[in-house]
Image (cartoon, grey):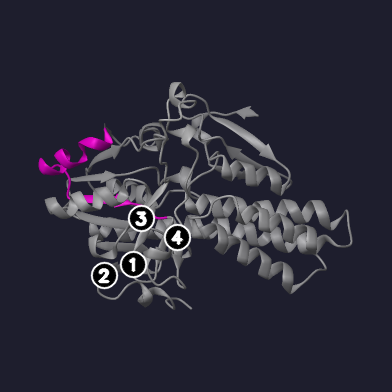
Amino acid sequence: MTEQNSQTVQALQWTGTSLKVLDQRRLPEHILYDEYTDAAGVTEAIASMRVRGAPAIGIAAAYGVVLSVRRHFTASGDWQQQVQADIDTLAKSRPTAVNLFWALEQMTAVLNSQDENPVAFAETLAKQIHADDIAANLKMGELGADLLAGAKGVLTHCNTGALATGGHGTALGVIRSAYRRHTLNVFAGETRPWLQGVRLTVWELAQDGIPVTLIADSAAAWLMKTGAVEWVIVGADRIAANGDTANKIGTYSLAVLAKQHGVKVMVVAPTTTIDWDMATGEHIEIEQRQQSELLPECYRDNSLVSAWNPVFDVTPASLISAIVTERGIVINPQEHGVGSLKHVGE
């Protein structure tokens, strides 16, 4: 484990032989990287939320496959079976983020296409997935900033910045890009129970010199009532073909509140987050995490007290004003879903 200066922080650092993962559970007090040399370690890093955010999870999984190939290709003639076992394990690390499965499918395809030099091919693809995500974020940042022209205030939820992606960020990337154009009042919800807003979003924005105001999650309705924000801007872990969106728990309630107060909702995510085969959000699997993450320790042995701890919720397309991707923007996705983006650029 190594500690590094905040000015050089990235969620993931590929060394060529290992993956360094910033332990986001320790931020902002400690900037610590854990180093992994096998797929099992990367799987544990994803499952334990050392690395989180759908795009970052997908990138980490891709590098996990590279580590698996590096380990097994030189050790055994049946390396394909061993690598596939590692891929299957990685796929079980988090069930909701579609980027995870997309990245693993890409890595599997390239490994199935040749076997003469799989390490080099796998590493090249993983690095490309990483670079493409950064490029997509920069593009989304500019597109989303166009929608914010004239806006004075925005509210964001969870963390959707460089810590959750390859770099720059999705929803937070839009805020970064917009702030470079004009002054913008940024509000961040605390995002219980893991407090990603408190620990990560506020910290990231402060690193960039962007003023931010933290609010309790329960203060969102009153903030909207005051007229301080015109947009709620969030990321996504999975988007169904009709535009229904799974995101951090609490997003659905913000969208309902936004509807009541005339505030618009912007979802920002790369097209790798879209599950083209899933018709609606009703079919999205919602990850349930341990009760211990929510229950105070004094209640954990009390049979009368339990906790319900879903990590995500699904916001229907009818509550979303715009979905911003690197391929373009869908306004009012309830009308036609996101199908218009499927073949853009192909």
Mark 3 surroundings: few (<14), some (14-19) or many (≥20) residues within 10 A? many
Location of mark 1 (residue)? 243
Q: Is residue 41 left or right of residue 22?
A: right
Tell me how far mark 4 sits from mark 2, CA to CA: 24 Å
- State which mark lies toward you, 3 or 2: 2
Tell me how far mark 3 sits from mark 1, CA to CA: 20 Å
Location of mark 3 (residue)? 141
Contact? badges 2 and 1 (CB < 8 Å): yes
Looking at the figure, which quarter contains the N terminus?
top right
Where is 159 relative to 272, above or below? above
Describe the element under mark 2 as helix, strand or loop. Answer: loop
Location of mark 2 (residue)? 334
Q: Which residues are magenta?
A: 216-236
Closer to the camera in the image, 34 or 209: 34
Location of mark 4 (residue)? 136
Q: Is residue 313 magenta?
A: no
Q: Is residue 161 left or right of residue 106?
A: left
Describe the element under mark 4 as helix, strand or loop. Answer: helix
Amino acid type indicated by mark 3:
Gly
Amino acid type indicated by mark 2:
Gln
Counting from the top left corner in percent of width and height, residue 151 is at 18, 50
- Residue at 39 percent across and 35 percent down: it is 193
Counting from the top left corner in percent of width and height, residue 228 is at 14, 42
- Residue at 62 percent across and 66 percent down: it is 106
